[in-house]
Amino acid sequence: MFTRRHFCFAAAAFASPLGAQTILNAADLGVLPDTGTDQSAPMTAAVQMAAAQGKALYVPTGTYHLADVPLPSGIVLFGSGVPPVLQLVRGENILNAAKARDLSLRGLHLRGNGGKDFNSFTGLFHAEGCDDLDITDCHFSNAATQGINLYACSGHISGNRMSGIYGAGIASLNATGLWLTENEIEGCENLGIYVARDEAGYDGTIITRNRVRNIRFAEGGDGQNGNAINAYLADNVVIADNVLSDCAFSAVRLNTTRDCQITGNNCNRLEEVAIFSEFGFSGSVISGNIIDEAAQGIAITNFDAQGRLAVCSNNIVRNIRERSPTNPDTTPVGIGVEADTLVSGNVVENVPGVGIALGWGPYLRDVSATGNIVRGCEIGIAVTVAEDAGAALISDNLIQVDKGRLAIAGTLWDETAEPDLIKNAAQYPQLTIQGNAIS
C-alpha cells in the first residue's frame, strides 16, 4: 500500500528523473486547473492511464471542476503543498470507486456546493465493495450528503478533515474491516461518524483518536441525529480515545449492537445523554471515559427491548445539567442502568438529580453497584422498588450527602417511594445493601 513514507518520497521525487518514472502529472495529461470548465473526462482518462502503468497521479495546486470520476484499483491520487481543490461541478460525488483494491487518496481537498440531501446515501467520495482503501490527509467540505461514504469497504481513513457536511462526516454501511483514526470532524449538521449495517451482525470497525465537535441535528429526531459517533446494528465496534464535544445529542450512541467497547473517550458539553447504549444491545463495555457537562451522563437502557449485559466502570461523570435543550424527556442522571450490568469504580459528581440510577419501574435485573464514589447529587443512588423489579446489589460505595438530600433511595418510576433504603432495606428482599459509607 502507498504509505505516508512513500507519499513523502513521491512528492520529493517528482521533479527528479526517478520521479518521472514513478509518477504522472495530471497537467501533462490534459487535466487543467482554474479553467472553470468540467475536467471530469480528462481526469478520468488520467487516472485510468496512471493505474494501468502502475504509477501515482500527481494533481498540482489549483481548482479542478469534477463530478463522478471513477477510480480504478491501484490508483494513487495525491497533491502536495497547498492541496488541490476538487470542486463538485454537478451531482453528488466528485470521486467514486466500485470493487476496487489498493486505492489511495492523499493531500486533496474535495469541496461540494452545499445544500441538503440527507436521504441520499452517497458522498463527495463514494465507494462500494472496495478493499484496502487508504484516504489520508484530505479535506472534505461543503457536502450536501456525506464527506466520505462507504458501502462494504475495508481500509484506513486517517488524518482527514471534515467541515460543513450536511449528513455525516464519515458514513459506513456493512464495513468489511475499517479503521477510522485521527480525523478532525467539525460543523456537521447531523452526524460526525456513522457506522451501521443493513442487518445486525459483525462489523469490527475501529474508531480511535478522532476529534469530533459541533454536531447539530438539522433533520431532527429523538437521537438518530446530533451525535459525534453512532453505531447501529454494528457488532464488535471499538470506540476509543476520541475527543468528542459540543453535540446536540450524544458523544457516543450504540443502538442494537453486540460486544462493543466505548473506552477512554473525553466527552464535553453534550446536550442529551453523553454515552448511550440502547434498545437491543448486548455486551457493552463503557470504561475509562470522562464526561463533563451533559444532560445525562451514561445510559444503559431498554431492558424492555432486550437491552442487557454491560460493564460500566472507572468513568468520571460530572456537571450534569438540569435539563436537555434538545430532548425535554431527558432527566438529570449521572449513570443509569437496567439489566445484567456491573457499575463499579465510577466517580459521579454534581448531578441535580440521581447520581446512579438502577432500574426503571419493573425494568431491573441483576445489577451490581459497587465501589463507586458519588458526590453532590440530589439522590446518591436510586433503585427501583416497583413490583416485579429484579435483584440489585449496592455495596461498598462512598456517598457524600448534603443536608436535605438522600443517600440511597427506592423509586417508583419518577417518584421517591422509600427515602432511606439503608434503614429499611429488609422490606425489599430482592435488594442487598451493605458496606456503604455515607458522609
Image (cartoon, grey):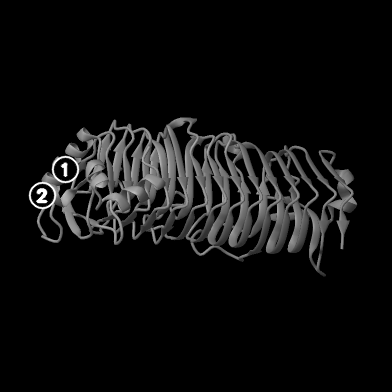
Secondary structure, mark 1, is helix
The percent coordinates of residue 419 (x first, y second) are: 81, 57
Secondary structure, mark 2, is loop
Please state, as top left, top right, bottom left or bottom right, where the C terminus lies in the image: bottom right
The percent coordinates of residue 327 (x first, y second) are: 51, 58
Q: Which mark is residue 30?
A: 2
The percent coordinates of residue 20 (x first, y second) are: 22, 45
The percent coordinates of residue 203 (x first, y second) are: 48, 33
Q: Residues within 10 Å of mark 1 (few under 14, many from 20)?
A: many
Q: Residue at x 63, y 36 (%)?
A: 308
Q: Which mark is residue 46?
A: 1
| Nearer to us in this view, 118 or 416 | 118
**The image quarter in which residue 305 lies:** top right
Tell me, yes or no, whether the two marked residues, 2 and 1, touch with CB atoms within 8 Å: yes
Please state, as top left, top right, bottom left or bottom right, where the N terminus lies in the image: top left
N-term-proximal mark, 2 vs 1: 2
Instruction: Say if 256 sits above or below 209 in the image.
Output: above
Q: Residue at x 68, y 57 (%)?
A: 316
Q: Which mark is residue 296?
A: none
Q: Is residue 231 left or right of residue 417?
A: left
**Residue type (three-letter) at the residue carrying disc 2:** Gly
Toward the bottom, the furthest residue is 403
